């Protein structure tokens, strides 16, 4: 895994050298702080660089920007499902209160929100998915999701957080600007 990650990061750096940033450049940002190891990782990459790298990687279940979801026991009509999510009215869709976790899934003002609180890991996860991201979800008949197509939608998103994770083990923030 480390060698694959190293190769991907090296490719990103090589491709990044000739890219000149402008005011129009959109950035994908990731910040991870790991408590136990004291590691702090900050990644700030132009979205076009991320797309170029993703389209060039070919490893295990990740080929040319597509990831195999490994769903073999279900026949899912992805376009119908995604359209139903996008066209659904605002409201709270899922509410789970259990001893080990609380989960909320809701939609408001064109954004799908997922909030998870895990008691065992003392973790809170927040995901904000504007409907433009749902538009970019392309899952084919082989249950492969086109990550490159999904990330292309980030070019049209407002600046802001997409994912945050806060736990005893680490904090993670993913955002676009």
Image: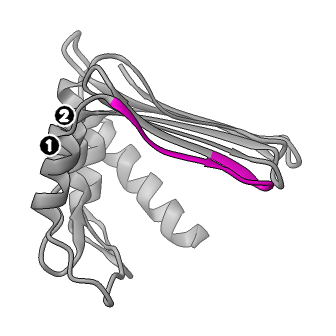
Q: Quadrant of the C terminus?
A: top left
* Residue positioned 23% across, 9% down in the render: 23
Q: Which mark is residue 83?
A: none
* Residue positioned 36% across, 82% down in the render: 70
Q: Main secondary structure of the magenta part?
A: strand
Residue 60 is one of the magenta-drawn residues: no
Residue 156 in picture, x, y percent from top left? 17, 25
Residue 98 in picture, x, y percent from top left? 73, 54
Left or right, 94 with respect to 118, comes to left
Provide the residue designation for mark 2.
132
Q: Judge whether residue 89 can be spotted in this image.
A: yes
Left or right, 90 with respect to 117, comes to left
Residue 94 is one of the magenta-drawn residues: yes
Dot 1 crowding, Cα within 10 Å, few <14, some 14–19, many 20+: some
Left or right, 102 with respect to 42, comes to right
Q: Secondary structure at mark 2?
A: helix
Q: Are marks 1 and 2 in contact (CB under 8 Å)?
A: yes
Of residue 142 and residue 106, the one placed in the foreground of this image is 106
| Residue found at the very far bottom of the displayed protein | 73
* Residue positioned 25% across, 25% down in the render: 110
Provide the residue designation for mark 1.
135
Residue 151 in picture, x, y percent from top left? 25, 44
Q: How many marks?
A: 2
Q: How is the image coloured?
A: one colour
Q: Which residues are magenta?
A: 91-102
Q: CA distance from mark 1 to mark 2?
A: 5 Å
Residue 69 in picture, x, y percent from top left? 34, 74
Q: Secondary structure at mark 1?
A: helix
* Residue positioned 18% across, 40% down in the render: 86
């Amino acid at each position: 895994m480390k060698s694959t990650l190293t190769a991907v990061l090296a490719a990103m750096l090589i491709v990044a050298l000739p890219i000149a940033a402008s005011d129009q450049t959109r950035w994908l940002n990731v910040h991870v702080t790991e408590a136990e190891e004291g590691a702090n990782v900050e990644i700030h990459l132009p979205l076009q660089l991320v797309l170029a790298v993703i389209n060039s990687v070919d490893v295990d279940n990740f080929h040319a920007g597509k990831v195999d979801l490994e769903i073999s026991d279900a026949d899912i009509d992805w376009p119908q499902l995604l359209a139903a999510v996008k066209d659904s009215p605002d409201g709270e869709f899922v509410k789970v209160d259990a001893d080990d976790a609380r989960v909320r899934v809701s939609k408001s003002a064109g954004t799908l929100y997922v909030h998870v609180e895990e008691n065992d890991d003392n973790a809170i996860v927040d995901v904000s998915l504007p409907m433009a991201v749902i538009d970019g979800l392309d899952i084919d008949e082989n249950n492969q999701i086109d990550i490159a197509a999904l990330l292309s939608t980030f070019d049209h998103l407002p600046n802001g957080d997409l994912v945050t994770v806060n736990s005893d083990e680490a904090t993670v923030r993913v955002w676009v600007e």
